[in-house]
Structures are given as structure tokens and as C-alpha cells.
Image (tube, helix red, strand yellow):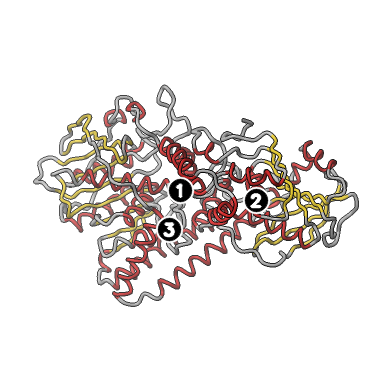
């Protein structure tokens, strides 16, 4: 088995950083002592929310159409399609009460992770329950669910999974062009409200939003990004980011806004942005979203509402069950909305009748792909191509500035501390012995470095010679030193050079054993820490680049002034960036390096993980710019990989 001596390093590192962010945000909240303070705080968080989610596109024509109507006893269901972006259709059901004087209160309903979206029993239930009490309800399919799969086969089956899997696939890819999947979902909700308000049956002074799980996410975000709501009821999502991290609970790309932690925001700020309008926070006692975080969120919101003289307008309710919009929770939502609108005195859910999926489909075969629309991927592909035209070639000082900014590289000072671990032998490396050093690249984070030699190494790293070879691993330096013949060839060719191999953070020796699944699973620990890097505004690939640069600083301090950087696969990304930035690197050999981020952004079927991507990198530069810069350092490329992590 490959060595893995620091499996919880990344978890504890991120816990420390997120706790620090939360403490700083709590200190800011503690300074809110008056109504004026509360009003200033609301202006501040709304501005920061806009930084996370914006800028939004210009509103384009909705081009709404009703493709059918289902008549029922006390309401009808209109099958509606509108466009939230040009040629980007949203399928929705509009529940319109019968026999009541219009206008009536309106509600936008957002869906959680059901394969059949708005046709899911939970979502039909609350939409129908509200309609039977006198609400006009527009409930729409999220991207990747129901009728809105973004990539389907010829027989309308998903090509990249449904729900979470498709959200991750296309949401991660959007990072390259500076987009956020959660903002796209929220924009669908904003445009759903736009459509709802075109209906004469709806009172624009009484409009609410509700949803559960992933729909609770969307509801929480919509509280922060849209000011027209007059009431809101997010269910089974709201907690704190610290609780999710400490509990090792991965969340979709859409649930992890970029820079949210760096800006001092949390779930509480999005829902509190509703203040002083009616807000109820719903959850279940047995939910996997930690209800302690919900209680903390409620306390923060309550404090703001109290200072605004509207404490009666915020409430929390916990059902007794597991995750889900159960009848008890739905009924609490009804009571809260009825209190705000006075449309009904009902306190319990009316009798419901579930429709078959196909009965309420808006499209003939249940997929918008039949309409030949643009997909999320098409927008990403086209944005990538446009950025390439705008960007042109980037070189010299402009390239290094762009790299430091995009990768969020910190200043480096001094020589890193290091630990001397027990040496290893008998591992069948290209040399008999390996001294092992844990180089502290920042507090609590270690790059694990092996120094290969024909003699035992049990003390501090030997000084010199001038030339060193530094291998940056793809998944495990230990495993690759034993199993990669090409590495052995490089070692044998480098007579007289010192030989080092390195695992950067989260790789090999610090491969996480957290989150309960294979770290390289699309929803595993590698993704988990990469997405937290985005929320902290320190992309994982930039953190790993910093590790390589600090190891090179360490090598320089021990007399190595000419470094031949060798790397493979994912390790080639950090190695490439570090090699461009470090004057000590004089030669570069890359195997299976990514051809370009543009190739990845413009390929629907790609396999590179989120940890390899940096937000908006294609706005500033691309890998070919780096490869051109490295030609002066004798760059050699071996079997480059394209978007599918396979030879081109």
C-alpha cells in the first residue's frame, strides 16, 4: 500500500481556516447594537452577496408559452415553458386556484434533488397544498432534473447522471470561465418570479418563495439576491458552513458560493437579507444538515430582526423526522404564509392527489432537449472561445502577474521548517534508500518529500549538489516511484544530481480518509476540499502550487540552485505554474500534462477534477501560455492529456 501518514491533515487545516473566518464574521456581528447598525449590516451583506453571485446577465425576453392545461376540482395546472436566458428553457407547472377572486398571493417553488423534479411527490404536494388554499404557485424544474437534463442520449436518458452528478459535472466546468452554478439556479428563480408577476392572477405585493433540500438551498440564495419577495420559507438546508465542514458533509457546487467565506458570509446572511419581511427557517430534528447550525443561523437572524423592531417576523420550526419536506413541515410553511397573506385560515394540509409525471410534463417526451435549446455546457464552451479571442497570448510579467492573482498565491518569506520522518528502505525505489521530510509549507500543512540516495538518510537533508531533480506526483510519489519505469529512466539519466519526490497537499501521503467515500469520487474528499478552497478564495491548485514553490525554496536553502522539475498528471499543473514562477527551475519534464484549460472547458465529456481548476482562469491566461514560457527552461512534454485525462 502507498504511504499515507497524514490522512486528516486537510480536514484539520480547513477546519482551522473556516473557524477563523467564522470568528471574524461573528466579531463583526457582535458590533451590531442599534437599528442603524442593523440597517448598515444588511446593506453590507447584500453588497457582498452580489459579489458572490453577480454580475447577472441582462434580462432577456421570457418567451413564455403554455403547452397544456390539467383541470382539477379546485385548481388547474398550466404547463409552462419560459426562457431564463436566450434559448435556455425552463419547464414549470403553474397551479392556479379556481373560484377565487384575483389577484391572489403568488409563490415560486424550488425543487430539491428528485430525479423527476417538479413531478416529485414532495414538490407536487406543497404546490398543490398551497394552490388549494388560494395561492398561485409556479414550481420549476432545476437544471439536471425533471425535464431539464442538460445532456441526454438519443432516447432521452442522462449522459452524465441526474441531479448531483450533472450539477457537479457542468457546475465544476463553469468555474473555468468564472461562472457559478448556484447563481445560474438562482437566476432561474429570479426569472420564475418575473414570469409569475406577469400573471394577472398574482398580487405583486404578496409573493413568496419556498423549497426543500436543494430547493432549500435555492430558496436561501434567492432570499439574498432578490428583493421582491415578501415572505420566504427555506427547508432542510440552512445551517452554517463550519458545521458542514466539521461534519465532513459534501455539498453540490451550487451550494458552495465562491468567496463566501472570504467575504465573511454564511447561510445566515442570505436568509437575514430578507429582514424585516416574514421569514421562517424549516428543518427536521434528524436531518443530516446539522440543526445546531440552523439554531445558530436563527439566532443571528433573530438579532437583526429584533433591532429592526420585527422579531415577530422571524421564526424557526423543527419537524421530528429525517431530511425532507414532510407534511408537518409543509403545514408549518402554510401557516406562516397564511399569517403573512391572510388568504386562508387553514392550519392543516388539504387532501392531495398526485399526478403521474407524464401528466404534468411540459414537453412531449419529458425533456427540453427535444426543443434543441442551448445547454449549460454550450454557454461554457462559447464563453471559453470568446475569452480566448479577447485574451490572446499572455507572456512575461503579464503572465506572472495573472498567475499570482488567479491562483491567489501568498507571499513567501524565509525557509520553511521541516520534520525528519523515519526513513524507508526496501520500497523498490530507483535508489535503495529514501529519507523522508515533512516540509511545512504553511502552518499545519506539509508537503511530503523523499530524498532518494544509495546511502541511508536519517538526519537533516544533505547539502548539495547544485543540481536537483524534483518529481511532483500525480496521486502518490511512493506508488509512482515504484511503478513508473519512465521515472526510473530519468533518475538513471541524472547522474550526480540529488533526487527528490514530492506529494503536495491532499495527495499521496496526505490523501484524505474523510467524507466517507473514495477521495477521488466526484463527491469525495478531493472535491470537498477543492470547493472549500473556492469558498475561501484560495483555489486548491493554487495551494498546491504554493507547496511546490515552498519545496523549491527549501531545496535552494540546502544548496540546490538548479532544479529539474518533473511531474505527471494532476501534479503537472502545480509543477507547471511553479516552474514558470521560480527562477531556480532550469529544466521541466511533464508527462500527461493537461493540454489546455480551453480544451477542458470546450469538451462536454471531461474527467479532470475540480481540484485542478481555478476560478476564471480563462479570463486571464491558459496553460499554453505557461508552456511557451517554459520553452526557455528546456520543456519536454510526454503524452499530454486532453480533457478526458487520456493521450491526445
Q: What x and y, as percent, mark residue 593?
A: 64, 40
CA neighbours of label 1 inside 10 A, class few (<14), some (14 to 19), many (20+): some
> Relative to the observer, which residue lies in front, 12 or 379?
379
**What's the mark number on residue 580?**
2
| Viewer-side label of 1, 2 | 2
Q: What x and y, as percent, mark residue 45?
A: 37, 64
**What's the mark number on residue 178?**
1
Specify whether 238 is left or right of 444.
Answer: left
In this view, the residue farthest toward the top is 154
Say if 355 sits above or below 551 in the image.
Answer: above
Q: Which residue is at a point 70% across and 35% down the rendered structure image?
A: 638
> Relative to the observer, which residue lies in front, 595 or 2?
595
Which element is circle 1 on?
Answer: loop
Say if 351 sits above or below 408 in the image.
Answer: above
**Residue 384 visible here:** yes
| Viewer-side label of 1, 3 | 1
**Residue 525 visible here:** no
Q: Which residue is at a point 19% across and 47% down the rendered structure image?
A: 197
Which element is circle 3 on?
Answer: loop
| Viewer-side label of 3, 2 | 2
Q: Which residue is at a point 34% across and 43% down the rendered structure image?
A: 111
Amino acid at each position: 500500500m502507498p504511504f499515507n501518514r497524514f490522512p486528516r491533515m486537510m480536514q484539520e487545516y480547513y477546519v482551522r481556516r473556516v473557524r477563523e473566518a467564522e470568528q471574524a464574521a461573528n466579531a463583526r456581528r457582535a458590533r451590531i447594537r442599534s437599528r442603524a447598525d442593523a440597517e448598515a449590516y444588511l446593506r453590507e451583506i447584500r453588497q457582498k452577496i452580489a459579489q458572490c453571485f453577480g454580475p447577472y446577465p441582462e434580462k432577456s425576453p421570457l418567451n413564455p408559452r403554455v403547452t397544456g392545461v390539467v383541470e382539477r376540482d379546485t385548481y388547474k395546472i398550466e404547463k409552462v415553458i419560459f426562457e431564463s436566458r436566450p434559448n435556455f428553457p425552463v419547464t414549470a407547472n403553474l397551479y392556479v386556484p379556481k373560484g377565487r377572486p384575483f389577484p391572489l398571493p403568488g409563490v415560486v417553488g424550488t425543487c430539491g434533488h428528485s430525479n423527476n423534479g417538479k413531478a416529485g411527490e414532495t414538490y407536487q404536494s406543497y404546490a398543490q397544498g398551497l394552490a388549494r388554499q388560494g395561492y398561485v404557485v409556479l414550481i420549476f424544474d432545476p437544471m439536471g432534473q425533471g425535464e431539464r437534463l442538460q445532456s441526454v442520449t438519443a432516447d432521452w436518458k442522462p449522459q452524465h447522471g441526474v441531479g448531483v452528478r450533472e450539477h457537479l459535472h457542468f457546475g465544476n466546468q463553469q468555474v473555468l470561465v468564472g461562472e457559478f452554478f448556484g447563481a445560474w439556479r438562482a437566476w432561474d428563480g429570479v426569472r420564475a418570479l418575473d414570469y409569475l408577476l406577469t400573471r394577472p392572477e398574482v398580487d405583486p405585493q404578496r409573493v413568496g418563495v419556498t423549497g426543500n433540500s436543494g430547493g432549500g438551498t435555492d430558496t436561501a440564495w434567492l432570499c439574498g439576491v432578490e428583493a421582491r419577495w415578501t415572505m420566504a420559507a427555506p427547508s432542510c438546508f440552512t445551517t452554517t458552513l463550519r458545521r458542514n465542514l466539521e461534519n465532513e458533509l459534501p455539498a453540490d457546487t451550487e451550494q458552495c458560493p465562491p468567496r463566501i467565506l472570504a467575504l465573511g458570509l454564511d447561510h445566515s446572511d442570505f436568509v437575514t437579507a430578507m429582514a424585516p419581511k416574514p421569514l421562517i427557517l424549516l428543518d427536521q430534528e434528524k436531518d443530516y444538515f446539522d440543526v445546531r447550525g440552523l439554531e445558530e443561523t436563527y439566532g443571528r437572524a433573530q438579532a437583526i430582526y429584533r433591532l429592526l423592531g420585527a422579531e415577530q417576523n422571524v421564526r424557526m420550526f423543527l419537524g421530528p423526522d429525517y431530511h425532507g419536506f414532510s407534511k408537518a413541515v409543509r403545514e408549518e410553511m402554510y401557516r406562516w404564509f397564511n399569517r403573512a397573506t391572510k388568504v386562508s385560515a387553514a392550519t392543516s394540509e388539504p387532501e392531495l392527489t398526485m399526478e403521474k409525471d407524464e401528466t404534468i410534463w411540459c414537453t412531449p417526451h419529458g425533456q427540453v432537449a427535444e426543443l434543441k435549446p442551448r445547454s449549460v455546457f454550450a454557454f461554457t464552451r462559447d464563453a471559453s472561445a470568446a475569452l480566448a479571442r479577447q485574451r490572446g497570448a499572455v507572456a512575461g510579467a503579464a503572465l506572472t502577474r495573472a498567475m499570482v492573482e488567479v491562483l491567489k498565491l501568498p507571499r513567501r518569506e524565509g525557509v520553511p521548517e521541516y520534520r525528519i520522518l523515519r526513513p524507508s528502505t526496501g520500497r523498490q525505489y530507483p535508489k535503495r534508500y529514501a529519507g523522508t521530510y515533512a516540509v511545512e509549507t504553511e502552518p499545519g500543512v506539509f508537503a511530503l518529500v523523499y530524498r532518494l540516495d544509495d546511502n541511508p538518510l536519517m538526519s537533516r537533508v544533505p547539502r548539495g549538489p547544485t543540481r536537483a531533480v524534483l518529481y511532483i506526483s500525480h496521486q502518490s510519489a511512493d506508488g509512482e516511484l515504484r511503478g513508473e519505469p519512465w521515472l526510473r529512466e530519468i533518475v538513471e539519466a541524472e547522474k550526480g544530481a540529488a533526487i527528490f519526490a514530492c506529494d503536495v497537499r491532499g495527495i499521496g501521503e496526505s490523501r484524505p480518509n474523510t467524507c466517507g467515500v473514495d477521495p477521488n469520487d466526484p463527491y469525495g474528499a478531493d472535491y470537498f476540499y477543492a470547493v472549500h478552497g473556492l469558498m475561501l478564495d484560495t483555489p486548491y491548485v493554487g495551494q498546491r502550487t504554493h507547496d511546490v514553490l515552498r519545496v523549491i525554496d527549501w531545496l535552494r536553502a540546502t544548496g540546490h540552485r538548479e532544479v529539474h522539475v518533473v511531474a505527471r498528471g494532476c501534479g503537472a499543473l502545480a509543477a507547471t505554474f511553479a516552474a514558470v514562477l521560480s527562477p531556480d527551475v532550469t529544466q521541466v519534464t511533464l508527462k500527461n500534462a493537461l493540454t489546455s484549460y480551453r480544451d477542458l472547458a470546450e469538451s462536454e465529456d471531461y474527467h479532470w477534477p475540480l481540484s485542478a481548476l481555478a476560478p476564471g482562469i480563462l479570463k486571464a491566461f491558459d496553460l499554453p501560455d505557461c508552456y511557451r514560457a517554459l520553452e526557455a527552461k528546456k520543456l519536454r512534454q510526454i503524452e499530454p492529456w486532453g480533457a478526458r485525462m487520456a493521450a491526445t
